[in-house]
Amino acid sequence: MEENSRKRIGKRIEELRLMKGVTKQALAKLTDISSASVTRIEAGRHSVGIDTLAKIAKVLDARLEIVENGQLRVEDNAWKTERERILIQLKNIRIEKNLRQRKFADILGIACCNMSMIESAKRSTGSEIVAQIARLLNCSLEIVTNSERKTMTVKKIKNSKKLSQAEIDFLKQNYREPLSFMTKQLGRSEIDIKSHLQKLKLRLR
């Protein structure tokens, strides 16, 4: 991770840890790293792998997320690992931006075969390279709490021109009356929304 990204993530970890009342020693024990490593991570002086960052985020009741233009990507798939979820999200953004893998690898200064290994999440990946990839794609790697995720997802849904099944599933999980929520937040009638969902073959119930 570039130094400023390391410091930003480190500061965020310290902030969440203090909010949760978790000591450095407890965080170290729960994530199987040393207390000295926690201190260095929070100070932005320690290079850390994405798997370790994901463990830290989980202990702090948060999640690693790729944020693009202030919005989360709501994915349909259930990934096996957090690393896989993050790296495949970045791959999807690269593809959406019509950037060929070989050209993107050249920009990063790495071999195309290494880029392929990173995007397929077949090996442990340092957060430095993840942050660099995200920056080149105009995104950022963030640690986001559950309440922040909910707020950001609702904002994305309100701005969405074409709802996805993942967004519908999010509403079903978080609201008793998702249809009522959509009529109020999206400013459309129930008939319009049902017709829209039917056209997109989305399941509300």
Image (cartoon, rainbow, N blue to C red):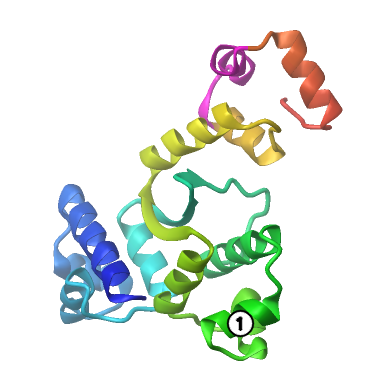
Q: Secondary structure at mark 1?
A: helix
Rendered view: 14 above or below 159: below
User: Which of the 4 quarters of the picture holds residue 33?
Assistant: bottom left
Q: Provide the residue span drawn in magenta.
A: 174-187
Rendered location of residue 188, percent (x, y)? 66, 12
Q: Nearer the viewer, residue 60 or 108?
A: 108
Q: Nearer the viewer, residue 160 or 193?
A: 160
Is 121 displayed left or right of 29 in the figure?
right
Question: Is disc 1 surrounded by few (<14), some (14 to 19) or many (20+) residues within 10 Å?
Answer: some
User: Which residue is labeled 1 in the image?
Assistant: 105
Residue drawn where x is 38% and y is 73% of the image: 52
Is 34 displayed left or right of 110 in the figure?
left
Q: Is residue 178 magenta?
A: yes
Rendered view: 79 above or below 1: above
Rendered location of residue 86, percent (x, y)? 54, 64
Is 37 displayed left or right of 58 in the figure?
left
